[in-house]
Amino acid sequence: MAGAAGSGRDEFVAAWASALSDTAFVPTERSALLERVGELADLLTASVAAREWEPAPVERAGAEIVRLGFFAPDALAATLRLAAGHLAGSDRRDAAQAALAAGFVRAAHERIFTEQETLRRSALEARDSAEAARRTSEARFRAMFSDAAIGIGITDTEGRLLEVNAAMAGMLDLRPEQMHHHHLVEFLHPDDPPELRHYFDEMVAGTRDHYRIERRFRKRDGTPLWTNVTVSLVRDETGAPQLLVGMVEDNTERHVLSEKLRHQANHDPLTRLGNRALFTERLNAAFAAGDGQRIGLCYLDLDGFKAINDTLGHVVGDQLLVEIADRLHRLVRAPGRLLARMGGDEFVVLVEHTDGMAELTALSERILAAVAEPVHIAGHRLTVSASVGIVERPVATSTPSDAMRDVDVTLHWAKVDGKNRWACYDPERNAREIARITLSAAMPAALENREFYVDYQPIVRLSDGQLLGVEALVRWAHPEFGRLGPDRFIGLAEETGLIVPLGHWVLAEACEQAVGWARLGGLEPVVSVNLAARQVAEPGLVDDIVQVLRTAGLPPTSLQLELTESAIMGTGEPLGALHKLVELGVRIAIDDFGTGYSNLSYLRHLPVHALKIAGAFVEGLRADEADSVDAQIVTALVSLAHSLKLDVIAEGVETRDQADRLRAIGCDQAQGWLYARPGPPAKINPWLA
């Protein structure tokens, strides 16, 4: 029975606590609330069960509910409802409910009265505090206004100064009374742009409540006072603009320092000229201005400056740059022009509103002449030259980045063309250069994709036209540019090093083709393959060629390698490699003989079997001019070769007259369009019969 009673008590306490919690939020943990409600439940139960009925304890329980923070009517209703259920069957239930209600209502009334009294006292204290704060605020404002280190001024909506503190007047070397009732504009610097006025107009119109700008005032002696001004709008009770309060901070020192730093950031410390940043800013501004103007750029670089730096030192080099910069500055200085040092020994001149390319070329001529004048530094008489790239165009059809790219390219052209000159931008030349770069980048993939192929041209015996050999000539079937001859890509291959794998591929193709012709059962011509200087310098040249011959099954005696004079005239490993190849039976021929470096005394020691006379000499041979200069040169070359027991092959034979003259001179072999143009292997088959 005791257990059942305890269970009923706990359920009542839990239900009572939950019902109270639903009526208000009280920052009390659930466990603490259950404990306190349990005490009230025990008090209620004990009072009802007492021998004599005393309502006072139950009233205290009702009052305690209010003190716990549950004073809403819902809290009382829930309490009475739950108490009625808990005390069901007791003849004192109604009395207990009445006592709970009485205690609850009395405590609630006391709470309301206490809160009202507290609010009344708080309102009185707030009024007194506000009045005291107002007086204090006014005193502080007056003290701040009068004694503040920062300048403060108050104007009406007309801009008339109503009050000015001592700091503000002192900034202008005036007394406050000298500024009162004067218009603010009287103290502003006349050089400030008038558009700054629109901030004030917006404040007066009520569309802006505050702004902050940098403004110049004019001191009593006329000197400028740079300031940071913060202006706030004061409205009347209707919200209309009434006053403007401005706070003025002297910013002159900071402005001067900022201008100095800006100058340093935009100028080269060595030459005091504008730097790349300033030039870029001016160039962008020129293009942004538009208005149909044309601009010109002269981009110059000193020729040979690095040699002076490396031999005489950077101190002398810097002094030379300063002198050149001074000369250029005196020469270029004019409205609409800017001279800047871009870095190192590079300078650029921006010319706005040009009259055309003639103005730029004339300026470049004067620049070249000025730079070429000798410079005396530290006992040295120094002479340098310059290369200049020129771009001139309308701003409407270009961009700053395009102009700089093109003038940089043009400067490179001036360098490549021989230095000490100017060059003008040429779109067609640039297109060729881009195509050249495109080809260079595409060559590795082209080799992988087998875009290269080999044509063959017959080499015949002049005496009877008998086929003796064929020259393998590489071509490129470019997917975009079409069929390309070796003059378009061999130079690029040599520059990039791709000539080594490309040459290896051509050699392998030619050797395999020679074996294919041999299988036909007719003539077996010697296949002649060009070898670049880069290939000759490769350490594994001999092993590579031997491997190619072995793989193809071609005898070494059926292979002839053609090298230029510059590639073969040397010593060391390359020459040793040629000797090894000759020992194997490979033939060596000097290609385009007579057009390069010809050391005749050295020629007799070289492992060479044949000389190929350049087509430039053959072109001038005619039957009716037996003693022409070209005829005499060819005669001398043939005589020289025969004295060294070398065969002579003439290239570029296109007419019967040329063939007759070569035969008369004693030339052994020939190749050219007279006999056949270079073509696929099938074109050689008829010659083999």
Image (cartoon, grey):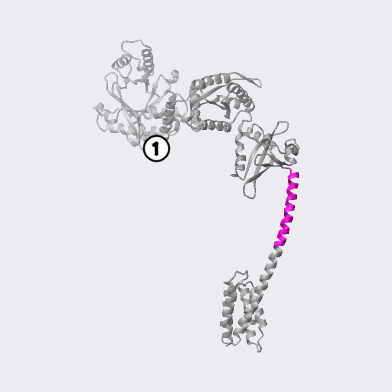
| Quadrant in the picture for residue 603 | top left
Please state the horizontal and vertical placement of residue 514, each as a whole percent of the image: 30, 31
Task: Please say whether residue 131 is one of the residues in the magenta stretch.
Answer: yes
Task: Please say whether residue 69 is one of the residues in the magenta stretch.
Answer: no
State the count of labels.
1
Residue 219 seen in the current view: yes
Q: Residue furthest left?
A: 689
Residue sitting at x 66%, y 20%: 379
What stretch of residues is rendered in magenta? Answer: 123-149
Left or right, 36 with reference to 145: left
Q: In what quadrant of the picture does the N terminus appear?
A: bottom right
| Quadrant in the picture for residue 196 | top right
Q: Amino acid at mark 1?
A: Ala
Left or right, 481 with reference to 408: left
Please state the horizontal and vertical placement of residue 82, each as a whole percent of the image: 57, 79
Residue 616 vs residue 266, the one in the foreground: 266
List the residue tagged with mark 1.
445
